[in-house]
Amino acid sequence: MTNQLILENHSLYKEQSINGRYLTYRQIEPLIKKWSTVFKVEELGFSENKLPIHLITLGKGSKKLLFWSQMHGNESTTTKAIFDILNFFSDKSNELSCKILHECTLYIVPMLNPDGALLYTRANFNKIDLNRDAQDLSQKESFIFKKLVDSVDPLVAFNLHGQRTIFSAGNTNNSAIISFLSPASNPERTVTESRQKGMRIIAEMNTALQKTIPNNIGRYDDGFNLNCTGDTLENRGITTILFEAGHHPEDYGREITRKLIYVSIITAIDFIANNGTPKEGYNAYFEIPENGKCFNDIILRNYNFKDHKTDIAIQYKEQLVGGELLFIPYVADIQNEISNYGHLEFDCLTNSIDVLTSSKELKINSEIDVFKINDKEFSVFPIKW
């Protein structure tokens, strides 16, 4: 099955019961129960606030691959893709699925941080970033994960995350829709054999994605921090690949990115099933531009501010209000000329724009109450134009 066919067939396997950015254990619990009748499902333990953490195991191959998502509770895009992938692998008529499961065994933790998912926070219930707890193992979730890694001893570990809308593929006006990283294993960031294997797999995914989203793939910074999970695993010699699900224009629900993550993961698994983990060709990894931070959500050009033509940058803060995820716009920057790009831009020389803030004064960090474009009022964000 070609990468294009994998992409086109996503609609057949998309898990329709979960959508959007706010994804909690309660929403995936019925899916966990459903898959327990098809695949092996184990309860690994409980979070700090006593929510269960599950492992789903499928396949019978010798190549052991470990996946975990929502280590950061507010990064749900890869979790949605994981459940799409489970639908894919449950299709016994799919030759690619059957071939992969013959060669590989997949170990999947769909939600490592269910407390953070419920609170829609990066950290867990105790306000600890689990991705900085790999050495201290101070949290139940961290200890559960460490025990799982020791038990599985994976050939490749897939660390699934999401990234903010600010990131660009290089210092360009191309959004980093997906970014990858082969984490460093030491402060010198030595390109070890283990990293070379991960880089080769990333290069394969990049080749596949360039056909669909050319110039929108980024390479995440590989600064070393042994407290980080990926760095700890690479330090142990376990090939690790970090995924960052990013922003596709006008896709704040990240449903398009979800599909691209699905394609990326299947591409990677198929490559490993066919080839194992070769290192030849790993240098192609360095052709992927390193992430820049070149974007704001909205930029107003030539806005009349204090009788001067000024650029205004607006950024959304994701905030859980009454169980609903809202995108709250605030003023991120005010300058004569902003060099960043906007995912949405308006030139106030050709559009009538009014920005009203709660402070009654337009200043950095002001929350925006009302946004008017050519007399059309927007109070729901993100706006579509």
Image: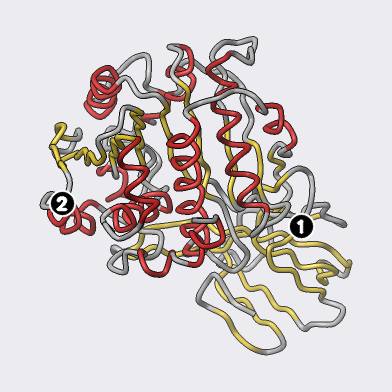
| Left or right position of 137 against 385 | left
Residue 254 in the image: above or below residue 56? below
Element type at marker 1?
strand
Residue 261 in the image: above or below residue 326? above
- The residue that appears at 40% across and 51% down in the rendered structure is 96
Give the Cα distance between marks 2 and 1.
47 Å
Name the outermost residue toward the bottom. 375
Question: 160 or 163: which is nearer to us?
Answer: 160
- The location of residue 235, given as percent across then percent down, is 47, 12
- The location of residue 106, given as percent across then percent down, is 31, 37
User: In this rendering, which labeled residue sits more in front, label 2 or label 1?
Assistant: 2
Q: Residues within 10 Å of mark 2 (few under 14, many from 20)?
A: few
Residue 44 in the image: above or below residue 331? above
Task: Say which quarter of the image contains residue 158.
Answer: top left
- The location of residue 337, given as percent across then percent down, is 87, 56
- The residue that appears at 25% across and 29% down in the rendered structure is 141
Task: Say which quarter of the image contains residue 187.
Answer: top right
- The location of residue 218, given as percent across then percent down, is 66, 42
Element type at marker 2?
loop
The residue pinned by badge 1 equals 341
**Residue 242: image tag:** none
Between discs 2 and 1, the one toward the N terminus? 2
Question: 59 or 303: which is nearer to us?
Answer: 59
- Tell me which amino acid carries mark 2: Val
Which quarter of the image is occupied by the C terminus?
bottom right
Question: 128 or 79: which is nearer to us?
Answer: 79
Q: Are marks 2 and 1 in contact (CB under 8 Å)?
A: no
- Tell me which amino acid carries mark 1: Tyr
Task: Say which quarter of the image contains residue 291.
Answer: top right
The residue pinned by badge 2 equals 38
- The residue that appears at 24% across and 41% down in the rendered structure is 58
Q: How many marks?
A: 2
